[in-house]
């Protein structure tokens, strides 16, 4: 059941324009936009009595509103974000104006974050100004409705203003919040210190530090705490050290803040300071009033973990050693909380093997693992691709008193299928039943999909029978797998009709599967006809059609449909455009190929697409485009020299492997990399280019490339000598090759074998008398 806000916004989302909703919205929008300015004084002047009255109205109205669960709140926020993305901030602001009675703090927060996201992703000053104006306008609307502006709302805005050094706007908003919400005074101190640090105002930083040095009375403790946290997060070691003599961090109210401080101690190598406070905590028997009595050892253990995980440039294994060493020095045992904190750290670093060793230590210490940490380990296994560890995880589940959920089993089954251990996946399904749970269609779908990827159609179809035996109804994903793996039109029709008879609600995956299945069977017209069903077709399905046609030899059809969709205002996925680029014909217009590359916006596909365009240019001698394309790649990987080296090696390998290698474009590529991009070629790149010289039988350029090794600071090795020896023989320079042979060490039998093969291949013909 949706509230008024959800229903209205959902109407907005599915409308083509705002004018479809409100015929007079254009005028309203113009009127609104004229009021939006980049200044805080836009806030209306409400008296305290007005605000108090409105807040009572809000509280009274909230009693009549639908109470959302956590998941539903996130759903409403997603609607607000979608509205912002579809309509843009200005129009969305107009929509919010129409829905004021149903708009709550979470909806405002979602829209403000959407505006900030747009502002962060652009370099256009005009767009940034618009987004910030909308943010301030939304804050004004919240105040007008009587909402208290808390940190969840103002925090992201202040952080953005700090990041962008928008000093005047920061102080204006800072003062407004301080006036309207006096209870936020202490927390605002954190942002104030961050702002002075960001702009480098050392005088103001010192002034705030001096207020801490003058004394830590209880009434000022909270603001001093926030000043100090800002210093810690900014690694201001020179400011932190003097304050440690006058401030007692164990009196701070926030457990999270104290943990942050100890993490900073580790990051700044302040072990003596960390030990000083930890020993004081242990001897006094207390930290702060937030720490529960008789639990100080456990809390101290978590602070030790915060310190150890903050130490920079340490391998995970060394962090664990430090963790154990400090516990030994303090004479305390690691707590369950600190173990789980350390396991989370290992998971973040994708060191799952190390994390599982810690789990073994937990059980040795007679402690118990929480299901939350168990699930974090499963997620880390998935992210790190260490899928084989699922067996160890399932062993933990079987041998210890853990209470898994349905979702836990779903993750375990998914990981089992990743390692193709279908027996284990079925064992988990049986275990699930024994624990009183009923398997879900999703679990069976995972197994079915795994069998289909293995081309094991018999076992995949058997999963459908297993679902019937378990009284689990197939869903749209089940039928998507079945349809997508059909080999004939009869099978496609059979499963599609069965889905309709079972009254299974179709999702976009079904038409996507239909398109792929028809295209794979060569029935391209039927694939196109799938899009005639407007009830289930969206932009993703259209993208799949473009991809399917391109990948099955119908490039020009795919390109024509792509252009048709684009002209109609549809967004085609980056994956589909990448597939068009992959299938682009060698005689196609290079301008059209470059235009396609501009339509790849997803970074996951852009690099692959750009590399394919570079390779197309190399193979088809479009050397004029190379510099711009390589420069784009360099900008993408400005901080990753290794990746760029691998990509350059791939480009030179492409030249060397072509049927008729074009040495000219290889030398052009070398010149661009060296002279225009300022990058030294790698050994592999020069090896491939030298090989190309041999295939082209161009000794002059081979000698030039040979000198490039020395210029790049790459010492000649056995492989370099062998390659040059081969080039000399290929070019008919047998006398020079014979002399060159004396430089090659012949201890290795493989080297002797290669030399012999070269001599046989390029054996000189006897001269005629």
Image (tube, rainbow, N blue to C red):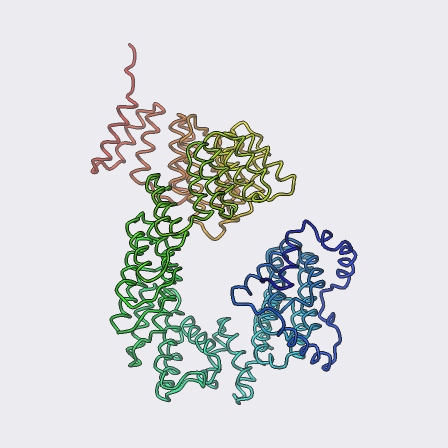
Q: Nearer the viewer, residue 147 or 502?
A: 502
Location of the N terminus (image quadrant): bottom right
Q: Is residue 617 visible?
A: no
* 743 to the left or right of 311: left
- Find residue 512 and report its horizontal and vertical position in percent: 50, 41
Question: Can you say whether 243 is above or below 483 in the image?
Answer: below
Q: Quadrant of residue 742?
A: top left
Location of the C terminus (image quadrant): top left
* 144 to the left or right of 162: right
Question: What residue is rendered at 31% in x and 71% in y?
Answer: 368
Q: Residue furthest front?
A: 501
- Find residue 298 and report its horizontal and vertical position in percent: 35, 79
Q: Is residue 647 visible?
A: yes
Q: Nearer the viewer, residue 429 or 500?
A: 500
Question: Can you say whether 668 is above or below 221 in the image?
Answer: above
- Find residue 747 and report its horizontal and vertical position in percent: 20, 38
Count of numbered tags? 0
- Find residue 239 and report its horizontal and vertical position in percent: 50, 77
Question: Can you say whether 704 is above or below 731 in the image?
Answer: below
* 308 to the left or right of 221: left
* 424 to the left or right of 292: left
Q: Quadrant of residue 454?
A: top left
């Amino acid at each position: 059941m949706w509230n008024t806000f959800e229903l209205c916004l959902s109407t907005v989302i599915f409308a083509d324009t705002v004018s479809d909703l409100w015929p007079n919205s254009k005028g309203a929008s113009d009127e609104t936009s004229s009021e939006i300015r980049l200044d805080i004084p836009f806030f209306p002047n409400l008296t305290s009595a007005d605000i108090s009255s409105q807040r009572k109205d809000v509280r009274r109205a909230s009693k009549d509103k639908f109470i959302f669960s956590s998941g539903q709140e996130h759903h409403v926020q997603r609607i607000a974000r979608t509205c912002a993305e579809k309509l843009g901030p200005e129009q969305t602001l107009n929509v919010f104006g129409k829905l004021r009675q149903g708009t709550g703090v979470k909806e405002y927060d979602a829209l403000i974050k959407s505006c900030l996201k747009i502002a962060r992703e652009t370099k256009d000053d005009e767009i940034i100004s618009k987004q910030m104006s909308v943010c301030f306008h939304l804050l004004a609307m919240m105040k007008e409705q009587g909402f208290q502006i808390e940190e969840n709302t103002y925090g992201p805005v202040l952080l953005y203003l700090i990041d962008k050094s928008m000093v005047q706007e920061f102080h204006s908003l800072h003062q407004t919040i301080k006036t309207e919400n006096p209870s936020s005074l202490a927390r605002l101190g954190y942002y104030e210190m961050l702002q002075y640090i960001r702009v480098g105002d050392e005088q103001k930083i010192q002034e705030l530090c001096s207020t801490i040095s003058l004394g830590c009375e209880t009434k000022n403790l909270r603001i001093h705490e926030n000043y100090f946290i800002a210093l810690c997060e900014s690694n201001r070691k020179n400011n932190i050290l003097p304050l440690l003599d006058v401030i007692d961090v164990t009196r701070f109210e926030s457990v999270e803040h104290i943990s942050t401080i100890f993490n900073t101690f580790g990051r700044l190598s302040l072990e003596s300071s960390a030990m000083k406070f930890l020993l004081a905590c242990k001897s006094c028997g207390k930290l702060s009033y937030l720490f529960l009595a008789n639990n100080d050892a456990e809390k101290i253990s978590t602070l030790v973990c915060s310190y150890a995980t903050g130490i920079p440039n340490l391998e995970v294994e060394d962090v664990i050693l430090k963790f154990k060493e400090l516990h030994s020095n303090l004479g305390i045992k690691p707590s369950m909380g600190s173990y789980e904190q350390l396991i989370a750290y290992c998971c973040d670093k994708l060191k799952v093997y190390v994390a599982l060793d810690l789990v073994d230590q937990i059980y040795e210490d007679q402690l118990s693992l929480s299901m939350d940490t168990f699930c974090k380990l499963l997620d880390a296994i998935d992210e790190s691709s260490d899928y084989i560890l699922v067996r160890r995880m399932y062993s933990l589940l079987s041998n210890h008193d853990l209470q898994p959920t349905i979702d836990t089993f779903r993750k375990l089954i998914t990981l089992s299928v990743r390692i193709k251990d279908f027996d284990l996946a079925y064992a988990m399904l049986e275990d699930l039943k024994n624990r009183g749970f009923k398997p879900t269609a999703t679990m069976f779908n995972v197994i079915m999909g795994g069998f289909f990827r293995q081309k094991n159609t018999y076992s995949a179809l058997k999963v459908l029978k297993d679902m019937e035996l378990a009284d689990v109804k197939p869903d749209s994903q089940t039928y998507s797998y079945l349809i997508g793996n059909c080999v004939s039109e009869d099978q496609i029709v059979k499963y599609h009709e069965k889905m309709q008879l079972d009254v299974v609600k179709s999702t976009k995956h079904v038409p996507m599967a239909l398109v792929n299945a028809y295209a794979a069977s060569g029935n391209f017209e039927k694939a196109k006809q799938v899009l005639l069903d407007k009830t289930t077709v969206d932009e993703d399905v259209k993208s799949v059609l473009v991809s399917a046609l391109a990948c099955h030899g119908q490039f020009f059809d795919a390109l024509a449909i792509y252009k048709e969709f684009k002209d109609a205002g549809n967004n085609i996925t980056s994956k589909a455009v990448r597939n068009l680029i992959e299938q682009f014909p060698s005689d196609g217009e290079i301008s059209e190929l470059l235009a396609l590359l501009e339509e790849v916006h997803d970074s996951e596909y852009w690099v692959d697409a750009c590399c394919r365009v570079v390779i197309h240019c190399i193979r088809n001698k479009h050397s004029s485009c190379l510099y711009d394309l390589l420069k784009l790649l360099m900008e993408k990987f400005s901080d990753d020299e290794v990746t760029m080296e691998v990509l350059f090696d791939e480009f030179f390998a492409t030249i060397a492997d072509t049927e008729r290698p074009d040495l000219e474009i290889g030398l052009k590529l070398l010149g661009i990399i060296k002279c225009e991009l300022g990058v030294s070629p790698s050994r592999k790149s020069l090896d491939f280019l030298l090989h190309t010289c041999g295939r082209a039988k161009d000794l002059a350029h081979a000698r030039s490339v040979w000198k490039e090794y020395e210029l790049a600071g790459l010492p000649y090795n056995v492989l370099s000598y062998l390659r040059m020896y081969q080039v000399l023989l290929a070019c008919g320079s047998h006398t020079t090759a014979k002399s060159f042979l004396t430089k090659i060490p012949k201890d290795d039998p493989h080297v002797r074998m290669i030399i012999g093969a070269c001599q046989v291949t390029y054996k000189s013909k006897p001269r005629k008398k």
